[in-house]
Every structure is written in C-alpha cells, then in structure tokens.
Amino acid sequence: MQLLWVVVVGVLGVFGAEGEQALCRILGSPEFPLLSKEGDVTIGGAFSIHTKITETPLSFTETPPPLTCSSMNLQDVHFAQTMIFAIEEINNSTSLLPNISIGYRIYDSCGSTLSSMHVAMALMNGQERTVGKTCSGQSAVHAIIGASDSSSTIVMSRSTGAFQIPVISHYATCACLSNRKEFPSFFRTIPSDFYQSRALAQLVKHFGWTWVGAVRSDNDYGNNGMATFVEAAGLEGVCIEYSEAILWNSPREQIARVVEVIGRASSRVVVAFVTQWEMDVLLEEALAQNLTGLQWVGSESWITVDRLATRRRSAVLSGALGFTISKSKIPGLREFLLRVGPAQDPNNTLLREFWEVTFSCRFSPQEESDGGPSQSQCSGSERLEEINNSFTDTSELRFSNNVYKAVYAVAHSIHDLLTCTHGKGQGGNRNCSDRDSIEPGQVLRYLRDVNFTMKSGERVYFDENGDPTATYELMNWQRDQAGETVFVTVGNYDASLPNGDQFSMNRIKIAWAGNSLKVHSYTENTW
C-alpha cells in the first residue's frame, strides 16, 4: 500500500495546481544512498547492510513514517565495499573504459521486500526533489548490482524491468528469475537453483539415500528451490518423508515443532534448503532438543558459513554435505578493506556504525539510560588488521567474487557500447552512444552479449536467461586435529558436462554424520 501512495502523489506532483507552472517534483522525503560517488556513468547497489526492519502500522491518514533498519550485517558491508573496490580498479584502468569515470549509489535493502521497493524507486528516480518542468524519465543509474536474496531481487527486478534497467544479482538463486518474460532485464553471476536442486537430488541418489526428510525457508529461495528438488528427487527414485518450512522470525513454537518432526522421523538424512538465517534458528532448537547423529545435506546459502560452524554446533552438523560456488582470489581486496573506516568520511553514518559494531565501542558517550553492557569510546585508531570477521575475511571470497564480476560485466558492456563492438547501440551499426547519452536500455542490450575473461582466467558471460554456467564445489564439514570445524572440498559438479560426467567425487575424503569416515547407506527404516 505504501507503493500505491508513492505512485499517486508522484502523479499529483507532476501536474501541480491549475494555473501554476508545472514541475516534476517528488512529494515526500527522497531516499539517500549510504555510500555514493559521482561519475560519468553510475552503478547502483542494493545490499542487506542491515537484517531487521521495523514496520509501523499504516493509518492511511498521514504520511507513513520512514522504515527503520537495524542489526548490521558485516557480510553485506563487505559486499558493498567489494563493489566500490571493483569500480575504483576500473576507474584506474587504462584499457577498460579509459577516460570514463564510474560513480555509484549504494543503498540498504535491509533484507526486506518493502525496503527493496523503496531502494528500486530511489535508484530509478534519484534523490533530487525537483527535476524540472517535465519529467525526463531518465534513470539515476545505468545498472544495479543486487540484491542479496531472491525475494528482494524479485521485487526490484519487477520494478526496473519495464524501464530496461539491468539488475545483476550476486546472491539471488531462485530459478524463477530465469523467466525472461517476467524479468527481461535480470542477470546474475551466481548459478540458478534449477541446477543446484538437481545436483542435490543426484547427490542423495548417488549415496543410496532414497528416504529423506526436507526443510526449507518459507520464501522464494526455499519454496522454489525445494519444489525443484522434490521433483528431481522423484525422478531419481528418492522419496520425501516430510517437508517443513520455517522463517528465521517464526514463533519459537513453530521452529520447535519442525525439529520435533525431524527427530521423530524414520529417515536419518535431512535436506535443508534454507538460508543461513533459518539455519541459525534451526540449529539452536536442534541443540535444545539434543538432535544429533543425522546426515545433513545443505544448500549454498549456509553450507560454508563460518559463524554456523562453532564447536557447539558441530555436534549437530558434523559430516554435513552440500554444494557451494567456487572460491576465488581478488588481489588487493584485503588491503582495500583494511583501509575502510570513518577516517575516510567522518560524517558518514554507515562507516561510524560499522566501526562501532566491529570494535564494540561508541563515538558518542553512552547514556546511562541506554541499558546493556557499557562500551568504551571509539578512538578511530582501532586496527582492522586485528579483527577476524565476515567483513575482513578474504580467505575464500565465493560470493564477493560474484559482486566483483557483476561490476566488471557492466563496465565491459558500457565499454563495448562506446566502442560499437557489437553494433547494438541506439542507432544500430551507424550510431553508438557517447559518454553523455548512455541509457540503461543500451547497457542492457550489450550485457546480453558480454563475454570477457577476468584477470583470474575466469570467463564471464550470460546465457539467454541471464544465467552463468552452473559449477559447484561439494563441501563436507569435518573436524581438524584441534577439534575445529573445517570445510573440505570433496567433489565438483559442472552442469555443462554430459549426464554421467557432471559429478567428480573423492569418497575417501568424506567424513559422515558423527565424524565417521565410513560410508553409510540410509534407506527407509534403516540406519
């Protein structure tokens, strides 16, 4: 309903009162980016920099209050800074877009569909209150990187598709986004779950696990991914004993009921197509009910998340198997991340909050009424080199590399447009854009044919649905000699290879549920 209100007042703002000079202006408060820089062309960014959102009930008699986001997500702050790193790297290049500067506008989608709609509108319209006598219809950005989940990306892509603004997601895997009729301007640098779900079904069949349970996130990611898995598993002769759905903010009673279902079931293999946030609450309840000894099979969203792999939780997840995208290296990124901080822009509220969360300190003196443990005052001279968290971690860069590739895909598309490489500019073979007249629709057309090789040797291109080639690593949760959980690569999956050749696996390396090295075959009513 908030969207409808925005559209209505937007129309009223165009025409104005009779007899007055018509102006195209925003009636209401514009959305401002958390991080921004001007350039000849502009790339938008949408990341779940916070994970909780407070929505005030609407009265429909007054302007809705601003949405409030909380609980900083350091992983997505890392993604946002990776986007900036890639842009600065391209701006310093003498071969890619020489003499053209890329700017950026990065917003917080808060992991919410409602907030993502606000972000999409801001990226399309900009934040200027008054545009001029007529609404030009010119987008504020030439392409958008994001969002960090399927549901938010679906909302954004539906909004931007009609205006031919490309959206490239680094994290949205829902197979539904491959529908070109519904999402004509969507691309992604992460494989579609169309392939992951089938790979999981083949994995389960490979080990003879023909009687399994299933748990999914109750959102676009989980519902679509699990539906594809169930269909593919049926074709492989795998039967599903139960299928349950949860959300991270589901009532405790509902999560407890799901864990009770898992514990009472005769199947001893659980396929969990859930996000890391749902896995978090599921694990806590599994520990509370002492649910151990099961063979977990997971999706890419949680199977390599370090914060889930504590010693305490390894009692539940030891021996877990699942697919994830390949790890990567981005030279120079760690050094760039370690320079991030409020010293770069002392007035930037995001950088100040990031510093306070990272070092558990505060820039302003803590009021006695704040409650909670007392925190020291930030000096600004704290050292990120001494911190090991999801922001500073560059050991694998699986999803960060997707952000990196997405920025380069946009840059190569604009480069091809300006040099008429494919002859698909606004005027076909005869006329191509100059730096002052680039339109998102032109970037979109060139993105469809982009094909280049990264410095790492990785090729980047999209198929007719905007998807990349689907390749995965098969990961296994094992314990090292110190008792810590480590993620070990025990196989690979390449969907581009013929059936029968897609899997390569090393059974000798695999540790199973209970940290056993023995290969178990779980069938109906047997362990």
Image: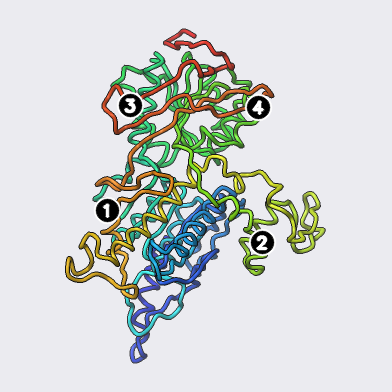
Labels 4 and 1: the sequence-earlier one: 1
Q: Using a 10 Å C-alpha cutoff, classify the residue at mark 3 as few (fewer than 14 neighbours), some (14 to 19) or many (20 or more).
A: some
- Depicted 370 relative to depicted 402: above or below: below
Q: Secondary structure at mark 2?
A: helix
The picture places residue 95, in percent across and down from the top left corner, at 39, 62
User: Is residue 186 in view?
Assistant: yes
Task: Kindly identify which residue carries mark 3.
Answer: 502
Labels 3 and 2: the sequence-earlier one: 2
Task: Kindly identify which residue carries mark 2.
Answer: 352
Labels 3 and 1: the sequence-earlier one: 1
The amino acid beneath tag 2 is Arg
Closer to us: 160 or 82: 82
The amino acid beneath tag 4 is Glu
Q: Secondary structure at mark 1?
A: loop
Task: Kindly identify which residue carries mark 4.
Answer: 484
- Depicted 458 relative to depicted 443: above or below: above
The picture places residue 54, in percent across and down from the top left corner, at 57, 55
